[in-house]
Image (cartoon, helix red, strand yellow):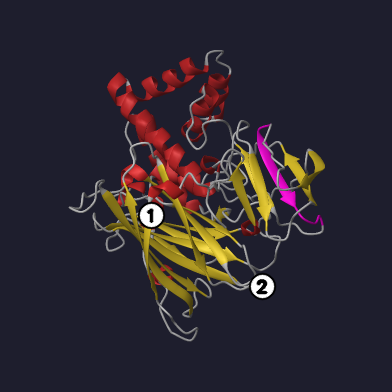
Amino acid sequence: MKLSTKYHHLFIVVILFTLVLSSCFSYKTPVRNSNVAYIYNPGSTPLHPQYKVFHNEDSTSLVFIKLTANELLYIKKLNNKKPEAAVQIHYKLFDSFTGNNIIDSATQVFFIEKDSNLFNIAFDITIKAKNSKRYLLDIIATDIYRGRGNQHFIEIDKSSEHTQQNYLLTLKTDNDPLFKNYLDNETEFQIKHKNLKNKKLFVSYYKGKYKLPAPPFSVSIMKTYVLAPDSTWEIMLTDTSTFNLEKYGMYHFRLDTSYRTGLTLFNFGKYYPVVKTQIKLLEPIRYLTTSREFKEYMMFKNKKEAIDNFWLKSTGNLNRAKELIRVYYNRVKFTNTYFSSFTEGWRTDRGMLYMIYGSPNTIYKNDNQERWIYGNTQGMHTMSYTFVKVSNPYSNNDYVLNRSDIYKMIWYQAVETWRNGRVFSIVK
């Protein structure tokens, strides 16, 4: 699939190194035994690529890559009129999170001329992934001139034609791929599927919002949401069909209603993953308040006054309040970026801990769980939390915390620290 001409004028020169590896080649996948805490720490690397997988053929898939132009280092060569950046994309495709077999591997280098009018740079690579299988893609994007990179792990699901990665969203205006599954009501898009043309799609709409997660120490049985759609309808897909998400909530598109999986899109508001409106700024402080306090804040006619009241009461100082607000709402943005599932990222179990404790020092990840460790793993002051992946037809990013009473003291200590005007951190 070709990108739009918007990207063709970048004069990207590609040098391709293909590493031909037999499927029996043994390699220890790094995600299994290594600390991958950097995947949720935006400060760990200056490069923050976005990825989108699309199963365009039975035996191959496309991986679209988007880079922010000003995150790259540009160098002017003697024989070039314009400075250029050099980006290396290296990937290994494994048969699973815990498997040792490399299915496919290659390295590509992209030279990109600087363009002051360009904000994003996008291109795609092809990986050899067959139908009816699941894989783990270990992909590293490196700014060659800066000598810094970003490693990312992507689950490749080709188990059926109904999974999310069989769909590709493109902008109506220029046919460029969309990298996120949350859109505002002003974004017009098209839906592509390799086996879908002039056919019906079934759409289920859910209004959302769901309850906040219980504290980490709550041992009450967590209820599983049984979601019933608020409305359903059918749409026809043609080469010119365009859509937009008119209302706040979740939209679930399926080829066949006998299958639970499909394409799920979300309208979480205009500025998502950033929160800007007064009500969106007020809601996340629920983690730091009692139920009674929060009800009182919600009753304020002027929600900005309620927000200012809380933070100034916590700090007693305008400058300290500004710093706490900066840290707290940056965390809201990061949780929305990393942990969005069928609800906003800050409303999830991982989002809750990230909001209050920050990014963990250590993360061990496999195909069905993540273990977060706060503090120095070589010392005595550590806390460990395990999140188990939930089978969810709406999201591949839904994890539930294994709760325990042992987390009560540290949780109350963290909340009290925030309420006293300081950012909480477990001893590192």
Q: Is the residue 296 above or below the residue 178 in the image?
A: above
Looking at the rendered structure, which numbered label has been put on residue 132?
2
Residue 383 seen by the camera: no
Q: SS class of the residue under badge 1? A: loop
Q: SS class of the residue under badge 2? A: loop
State the residue lying farthest toward the left: 78
Amino acid marked by disc 2: Ser
Q: Which residues are magenta?
A: 247-257
Residue at 21% from the left image edge and 54% from the top image edge: 79
Taking the image as shown, residue 134 lies to the left or right of residue 31, namely right
Crowd tier of the residue under label 1, counting other residues whose Cα lies within 10 Å: few below 14, some 14–19, many 20 or above? some
Taking the image as shown, residue 109 lies to the left or right of residue 158, namely left
Q: Is the residue 375 above or below the residue 233 in the image?
A: below
Amino acid marked by disc 1: Ile
- Residue 215 drawn at (x, y percent): 52, 44
Q: Is residue 103 magenta?
A: no
Q: Is residue 249 magenta?
A: yes
**Total count of labels:** 2
Residue at the spot of label 1:
12
Q: Is the residue 107 above or below the residue 67 in the image?
A: below
Q: Are marks 2 and 1 in contact (CB under 8 Å)?
A: no
- Residue 26 drawn at (x, y percent): 43, 84
State the residue lying farthest toward the bottom: 24
Residue at 61% from the left image edge and 31% from the top image edge: 186
